[in-house]
Image: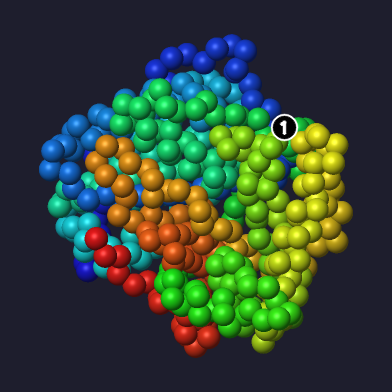
Amino acid sequence: MDTMKVETIGKEIIKPSATTPTDLSTLQLSIMDILMPPVYAVAFLFYTKDDLISQEQTSHTLKTSLSEILTKFHPLAGRVNGVTIKSTDEGAVFVEARVDNCDLSGFLRSPDTESLKQLLPVDDEPAPTWPLLLVKATYFRCGGMAIGLCISHRLADAASLSIFLQAWAATARGESDLVASPDFCSTKLYPAANEAIKIPGEVVNRTSVTKRFVFVASKIEELRNKVASDVVPRPTRVQSVTSLIWKCVVTASTDTIREKALFQPANLRTKIPSLLSENQIGNLLFNSLILDGKAGMDIVETVKELQKRAEDLSGLVQDEEGSSMTIGWRLFGEIINSKFNREDHDMHSVTSWCKIPLYDACFGWGSPVWVAGSVSPNLDYVTVLIDSKDGQGIEAWVTLPQENMLLLEQSTELLAFASPNPSVLI
């Protein structure tokens, strides 16, 4: 495929269709929100052409429904102000673009990450200040389209991104009466942030690269069977894939001196459903930590550690006193009491977006034919796991320094279970 050329044809600010009430003008961020790096959570959604809807109609629907849904998600139209968000109704950025030298099907034959970056409404560069929500609608010459969505990680995790996306799509379909009001209050769990907390600074742009590896259902099943034994209970899909990727990433490291650490964020909404709303927006996460990154380690040992961390987390979120704040302080205590030192370790985060219903985002012209996700700017040691369209396979987006990635791509153990960037069939 020739180098894809994306041309911007329009850019505007979309403001909420109604003014935010004064009593809702300030949102207090939690400690967990503030500790997030200054990056965007990013989703790419691809749609084939609908012959009954023109490009002009599509853009009009996206913009008017975005304006309407921002009245419920008003903090996304505001700006960060220290440890709060001011709902100033300044609006979200909406960009329109087109690709005249490529069809959607051609792009999806080999969806490389450099081309994907062109479909984002932001450059892959650190920025000191930025809007909380940006959208880019890109139209291919065949009539297919891509929506690139960026939400500040200061305010939203991957589940929050999906909550917003489903609400926006329902509004575009004319079903706004079915949209539940979001709960912007992560301080119901974690303590409120204050000015004394050291906020992570600007992300340094490095020479990392991102590659896609796809695990089909049959290979995941084979991997799960390989790990399971009388000693190790049958692992989940995510535990199996995480353990294999972690081993291969450690083996591919060119630095054999520094210790390696694995982080695995867990979505707490499903862990404490009696206390956390399924529509709660914020960074409702807890990071499980493994500090045994040794080359040649057995994936069975990593699975055992992941299962132990899951059991430990279940114990931490037991609602003994009926208070989410009690649990929040308990979880935060685990984080600050950790002896882990980021300066002494290469930290690799494997974050799972599996079971997050991104493929349900129908704006009125069908469901996405393909979904991808990441963060922007890219961080050096991050893997994002996303369900394949069939809900059974897993697509892993692995980001590593370039020299490490060259070794990872040659890993026979990884390639025995995963295919490097196969075509997306539509």
Q: Position of residue 375 (x, y in %)?
A: 51, 53
Image point (38%, 45%), residue name? 360
In screen coordinates, is 191 left or right of 123?
right
Image quarter of residue 306: bottom right
For the point 50% across and 50% down, the residue is 356
- Location of the N terminus by quadrant is bottom left
Q: Is residue 265 visible?
A: yes
Q: Which residue is mark 1?
A: 188
Q: Identify which residue is drawn at 54% across, 47% down.
A: 158
Horizontal and vertical percent for residue 69? 42, 26
Quarter of the rendering containing residue 371: bottom left
The answer to which quarter of the image holds residue 307 is: bottom right
Q: Residue furthest front?
A: 230
**In the figure, is residue 347 to the left or right of 173?**
right
Q: Which residue is most to the left?
A: 51
Q: In the picture shown, does residue 326 fall above or below 255?
A: above
Which residue type carries mark 1?
A: Lys
Element carrying mark 1:
helix
Q: How is the image coloured?
A: rainbow
Q: In the figure, 312 relative to 97: above or below?
A: below
Q: Can you give x and y, in whole percent of width and height, for residue 297 in the image?
A: 69, 84
- Mark 1 surroundings: few (<14), some (14-19) or many (≥20) residues within 10 A: some
Closest to the observer: 65 or 180? 180
Can the viewer see residue 208 in this picture?
Answer: no
Query: Which quadrant: the C terminus?
Result: bottom left
| Numbered marks: total | 1
Q: Nearer the viewer, residue 204 or 362?
A: 362
Left or right: residue 369 versus residue 187 is left
**Location of residue 187 in the rendering, given as x and y in whole percent from the top left corner:** 72, 32
**Residue 181 left/right relative to 46:** right
